Image: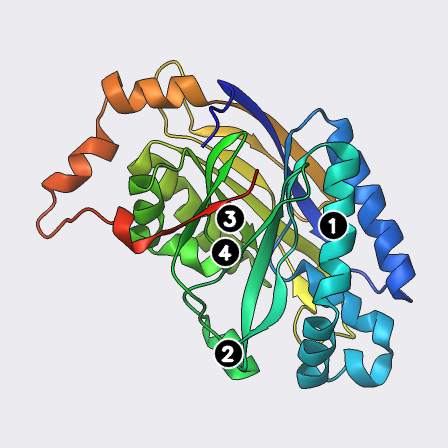
Amino acid sequence: MADGPDRIRVAAAQYPIEAPASLAAWREKQARWIGEGAATGARLLVMPEYGLMEIAHAFGHSIAGDLAASLAALAGARAEIDAHNAQLARTHRVHLLAASGPDVRDGRYVNAARLHAPSGAMGSVEKVIMTPFEIAWGVSGGGRPAVFDTTLGRIGVSICYDCEFPLLARAQVDAGADVILVPSCTERLSGFNRVRTGARARALEGQIATVVSPTVGEAPWSPAVDHNRGAAGIFVPAEHGVSDTGCLAEGVLDRPQWVTAEIDLSALRGVRARGEMRNAADWMQQPGATPLAATVDVVTVQ
């Protein structure tokens, strides 16, 4: 892994689910959003869970209003979607965690997100634990937790519900992640607050940074992402010299926007070594705690 900088500016999208009339219209929207995110000076852009579902509208009402048809159409378009996002990452010289959506693995649908590097390299990560809604949709849990080796450092991804389970994030911390990205999609404030609480807890436990990017807005035409509530947030442990509140930045609820902050990786590493508390190291004092790095896939995206 290449050595990362001491500081990373990150931008998390509060991304509005809309109704693109065509794939070309979606490409234009995506280009505008990534351009605006890059203009903040961020080197790492984070998009939400199931942000790709809006593309179903581009295939017409018969597909957009049918969940099974939407999943099939989007999975079939993944190569084109990936190529567009890869080009945007190259153009703007950013690392881009693109919005997640349905993909096919071993004959079943999974919820997968791609991390694109400025070089054109790409890595994929799948959501591990399914919500009751996804089970009803016919989406299955994916593979093992993953971390990405990048020129910015080692980055983990916990898609939405996954961040509510501490052992998944702990495995990524054990594998060396300084930052865990949390793309999310929640229809109610209760869901948004569960993910927000999970992300803040994971930052506290691992003494790392977590970055939440949600979908927002109404899409009554969609049987999957019709209601979307949330706010982006960039969280760290509440530690002297890092943040007194544990919140570096947070958006205005439900308002489409980019939320940005600078993450001081050297300060976080210092907290783990000599902070007020030793949550990361003291994890192993819990009865039954075991090292989890071996349960994580390490993917090079440079």
Q: Which residue is mark 1?
A: 85
Note whether 137 is above or below 94 in the view shown: below
Disc 4 or 3, which lies upstream in sequence?
A: 4
**Residue drawn at x 75%, y 55% as measured from the top left:** 83
Describe the element under mark 4 as helix, strand or loop.
loop
SS for callout 1: helix
Residue linked to disc 2: 106
Q: Residues within 10 Å of mark 3 (few under 14, many from 20)?
A: many
Please tell me which of labels 1 and 2 falls first in the chain. Answer: 1
Point out residue 250 in the picture as x, y percentages from the top left corner: 58, 35
**Crowd band around label 1 with a 10 angstrom C-alpha radius: few (<14), some (14–19), many (20+):** many
State the CA–CA distance, disc 2 to disc 3.
25 Å
Are the residues at dot 4 and dot 3 in contact (C-beta closer than 8 Å)?
Answer: yes
Name which residue type carries label 2: Asp
Q: Amino acid at mark 4?
A: Ile
Q: Residue at x 70, y 66 (%)?
A: 78
Question: Residues under labels 1 and 4: Cα distance?
Answer: 19 Å
Question: If the image is split into quadrants, where does the C terminus sit?
Answer: top right
Q: Is residue 249 left or right of residue 176?
A: right
Specify which label sits upstream in the sequence, 2 or 3. 2
Is 137 rendered above or below residue 167? below
What is the quadrant of residue 252 in the picture? top right
